[in-house]
Image (cartoon, grey):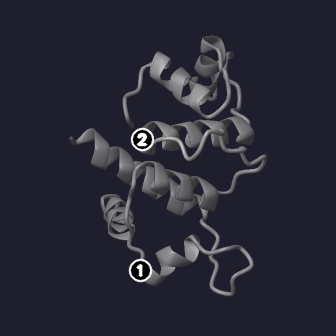
Amino acid sequence: MFDFNDETMLSIFKLGGYDATKPELLSWLARDEAPEFAVCADENLARFLNGLIIKNRGPKGDEVPEPERKLTNNIVLRKLKIALNLQADDLLEMLKLNDFNLGQHELSALFRRPDHKNYRECLDQLLRNFLDGMEKHYRKK
């Protein structure tokens, strides 16, 4: 969706604390049915998202943030929100680009702590619609 070349993607991984190789990257980006396809582990995706935050917002201190071992859709959504400096209205607009309507309160529930009484799990459908809306938003520019 951002039209990054391989070198840019590898540099983002490096900012996140992982020295990925080009063959590794190509296997993660391959289609599911391709023989070279490999699943990107949660920890590596977390490192990429952390690297994207550092690339776009700058480092927070001297240390590379420790990646999560297990990602949830809520964590992915939060990291993208931070990396792209998105406000609630921006997120809602991107969802609307995909004809997915969500209220302000429903959105804020996605960013609460899991033990909060108003926490809401981000389902695959919501994240997929957000990513599709993001692509429409960034590709039109």
Q: Nearer the viewer, residue 129 or 33?
A: 129
Specify the quadrant that holds the N terminus: top left
Residue furthest out toward the front: 62
Please report whichever mark, 2 or 1, sits nearer to the chain's N-terminal start.
2
Residue pictured at 64% horizontal, 12% vertical: 23
Residue pictured at 40% horizontal, 50% vertical: 84
Q: Residue 66's spot in the image, x, y percent? A: 72, 44
Q: Is residue 102 above or below residue 43?
A: below
Q: Residue 74's spot in the image, x, y percent? A: 61, 62
SS under mark 2: helix
Specify the quadrant that holds the C terminus: top left
Q: Is residue 41 above or below residue 93?
A: above
Query: In the rendered image, which residue does mark 1 sit on?
Result: 103
Residue pictured at 57% horizontal, 70% vertical: 111
Query: In the rendered image, which residue does mark 2 sit on?
Result: 56
SS under mark 1: loop
